[in-house]
Image (spheres, rainbow, N blue to C red):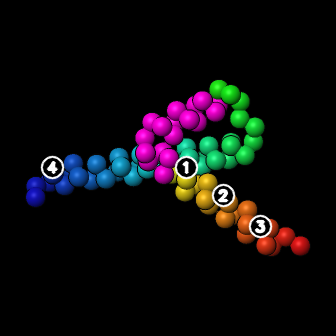
Amino acid sequence: MNLSMVAAKYQLLRESTTNEDLVWNAAVEWVMREHEILTPDELIELTAWLKADPAHLAAYDEASYLWKLTGIAMQKTDY
């Protein structure tokens, strides 16, 4: 494998990781915003974002699950 192939694979890996991070960050932001009052336009925006890519829905589902787990843990430690 030559140096240019290694560089190309490294660049693809970096872009993939960066994209996953962006999707995850957006999903977490949507989950947090969802627990406030979303305007009708924001709800349309969320729905469009979820439908745009299966990775969006997967990240959103995972972030929602973690949000729920955090709430359960907080309830158990409240006195």
**Mark 3: secondary structure:** helix
Circle nearer the viewer, 2 or 4: 2
Is residue 72 found left or right of 65 in the rendered image?
right
Circle nearer the viewer, 3 or 4: 3
Looking at the rendered structure, the kind of residue marked 4 is Ser
Is residue 79 found left or right of 5 in the rendered image?
right
Q: Residue at x 71, y 30 (%)?
A: 39
* First along the sequence among labels 1 and 3: 1
User: Which of the labelled discs sits on residue 74, or is there none?
Assistant: 3
Residue identifier under label 2 = 67
Residue identifier under label 1 = 60
What are the residue bounds of the magenta stretch? 42-58
Circle nearer the viewer, 4 or 1: 1
- How packed mark 2 is, by other alpha carbons closer than 10 Å (few <14, some 14-19, many 20 or more), is some
**Is residue 34 shown above or below 77?**
above
* First along the sequence among labels 3 and 4: 4
Looking at the rendered structure, the kind of residue marked 3 is Met
* First along the sequence among labels 3 and 2: 2
